[in-house]
Image (spheres, rainbow, N blue to C red):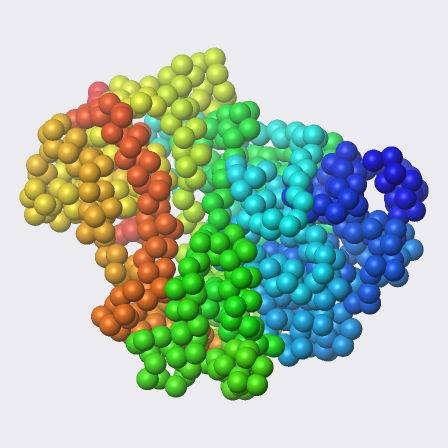
Amino acid sequence: MSTFKTTEGYQIIENWMHSKNQEPFSFQYKTWQKYHSGYSGLVVAPTGFGKTFSVFIAVVIDYLNQPEQYKKGLKLIWISPLRSLAKDLAKAMNEAVDEIGLDWQIEVRNGDTPTKDRRRQERLMPDVLLTTPETLHLLFSQKKNSRWFKNVKCVAVDEWHELLGSKRGVLTELAIARIKNLTKQLQIWGISATIGNLQEAQEVLIPYKDLKTIQIKAKEKKKIKIVSILPDDVETLPWAGHLGRSLSSKIVPVIYENNTTLIFTNTRNQSELWYQIILEEEPDLIGQIAIHHGSIARDQRNWIEEAISNGQLKAVICTSSLDLGVDFKPVDSVIQIGSAKGIARFLQRAGRSGHSPFEISKIYAVPTHLLELIEVSAVKEAVKQNEIEAKPPMVLTYDVMVQFLVTLAVGEGFDRDKIYKLLKETFVFSYLTLEEFNWAIHFITQGGTTLNAYEEFHKVVLDEKDGLYKVKSRRISMLHRMNIGVIFSEAMLMVKFKSGGYIGMVEEYFISKLKPGQSFILSGRVLELSTVKDMQVLVKSSKAKKAITPSWNGGRLPLTSYLTHFLRLKLNDALQANNREPELKFLHPMLIRQAKTSHIPKSDEFLVELMQTKDGFHLFMYPFEGRLVNEIMASLMAYRISKIKPLTFTIAMNDYGFELLSDQEMPLNEDIIHSILSIENLMEDVTASINASEMASRKFRDIAVVAGLVVQSQPGTRKNNKSLQSSSGLIFRVLEEYEPNNLLLKQAYTEVFNQQLEEVRLRAAFERISKSKIVVKQTKGFTPLSFPLKVDSLRNSMSNEDLSKRIERIKKQMFKFEE
């Protein structure tokens, strides 16, 4: 270790840091020293402690110590999940090398990079390239691309916890495997926040037996202060959504008390709504607050990010678009509107405030629903116990493998045996069989056994001269390059003024429901729809008092299993709330009402409520497992009951429970309730209770696009989701009938079970229920737990005004009844 301290490179860095009155943290120094000794590894440290410079400076020191070992061009590839993150990092790195006196070119390459800059980079790559997984694969599709990577010394993956568990993570694994194959001596480093499976995360990133690996954890801990913003009164019959608005008067003082506040919402439409709510509450903030989310014009997002850095804005209402590592020093508080749905996400957002190492990160929790206060208490307990969710990695994603093979074939071509060996060395394809690999080769060369009659699926050919698999068609090469990637969302339409000027993006399904002349809100403006032409929405400014806020499907996040575990524990504690956390103490009257009118389930109990109203017969169950699992459970219960007696149901669900409503009495007693909650034949009944084939068909659409079975983007045009579904649905049905063992078809069903049906979590929930005492209560009216479900079911069929009147009427009836 002392030898490392005497090296010229370390001495230069030490002098540089002294000139800035800084010293390295112990984890930074350890990373530099281990890099110097030839290690690869994973750095785990809190936000704001200089994780980036732990790896970046390690490469700089190594270069300063042995410049003769480094050739011209790429030395370090820095993979980042977000474009905005890369821009911010490049700025910090350039400042550092300028101060150190190092003549390095540090550049960004992603979808925003101008064409002239890309061509210049291709002639001579910079010393450090900050890029995304998709852009790296685009580089692999260029002719003679291996020359760019032959002298790379290090690949660093920033925010690895964000990529892990997604197909973008798989692209990252494959990119590293190819670069390692091309260069003599590659070191691989990941940078991550804390997650529940750090060792596994490291093994996924660096599965190579020939590399020495280490995990370096910072001893320093980030202090976090979690404050709940409590309403003035406790509603003993709470309902979701309305409460946040009434707390806006308590949010404004927080904004004024701090330099800059980030206000996080889970969806884009919530951010648009909250921009309006805050301005209605405090009009003086106009010009001092802004909205930031993925559907706002890039130039406007860039301006907002600059304005935050310069301290020009008092508050920014944002989504996950500002979740990750962008270093905004003026930000000294964070507000979370509603539930963050997960412990890691809550901590990630808290870490955006107090960004320098020893500042306290302040986060204010604003409930939109009183029960969310129990979630805040649950998060506090999880933080105290240092429990954070795991991110399970993906395995055997055949669609990404097929795309990767065609990418290599479009580029320089690939050798069949060598590429099979390369795939087997990665974590994601470590269990790939030779039979499955041969299927993939047959698929990209012949279209498989079913689609072989169609010339368009004969993409790759074996070149007899050099024995490499290549794409010879210029058209196939062009289309493939245009469609590299694995990110899918609802098709987005560009919103522009008729007179010119870009405003932002909205999802196709939202705008398709509007008629010309109707008004909606985007980017803080009230706009009137004029017409939709191709992929553009033409609008004009509107003075309408009422306007629709766009809804984005991607925002319906489920509660994580870790958070639901702590939620159940806190509910268990709730009745002893008088001397405990402020959240539970505040909720005491509501919880007393729940105990009086029904029951508060302990952590080893499962509550079922039955009730009859003029609407019909109600069954309420409370798994506390998050929306996705509750939705599947609701369908399963409806299916199992209808096997006993044919009934039709209306279903409502939230993160805590679900409701089945029928106009006929359900055949339910305690024995039948035990039997319908049985774990026996669980997945068979789940598959029968939902349209698994239809779900798999929808999932297959994305798989088909990744694997190149259907082409989304073509020159000058882009297929909408309806068209994609039609094309992929046809192929899905053909494969179901004629090639049921097709790996992409099997993958569609696997993804439905793992991601949409959450099979592992569903089984765990039923195992927990099987060991729990099932408590069945006949109630005379709605309870604090069932009332929010009733409101959610009404919300789908009523206007806000009618809904409020109906809610007040139900409440009056309830309280009158109880008197």
Q: Is residue 371 left or right of residue 382?
A: left
**Residue at the spot 41% in from the left edge and 37% down from the top edge:** 561
Q: Number of numbered discs present?
A: 0
Residue 117 can be seen in this image? no
**Is 374 in front, or is 357?**
357
Rendered position, 500 above or below 800: below
Q: Which residue is found at the position 51% from the left and 74% from the top? A: 406
Q: Position of residue 473 (x, y in %)?
A: 51, 86
Can residue 221 be seen here? The reply is yes
Q: Position of residue 347 (x, y in %)?
A: 57, 37
The front one of 583 and 206 is 206
Residue 57 vertical placement versus 466 (above, below)? above
Q: Nearer the viewer, residue 262 or 165?
A: 165
Q: Residue at x 75, y 42 (%)?
A: 34
Residue 594 drawn above or below residue 705: above
Residue 70 position by quadrant: bottom right
Residue 529: % across, % down: 45, 70
Q: Indicate the quadrant where residue 610 lies.
A: top left
Task: Determine whether, in the image, residue 546 is placed left or right of residue 36.
Answer: left
Q: Quadrant of the N terminus?
A: top right
Residue 183 versus residue 556 in the image, above or below: below
Residue in the foreground of this view, choosing between 185 and 202 = 185
Quadrant including the C terminus: top left
Q: x, y (%) of residue 597?
A: 24, 22
Residue drawn at (65%, 57%), measured in percent from left and top?
Answer: 79
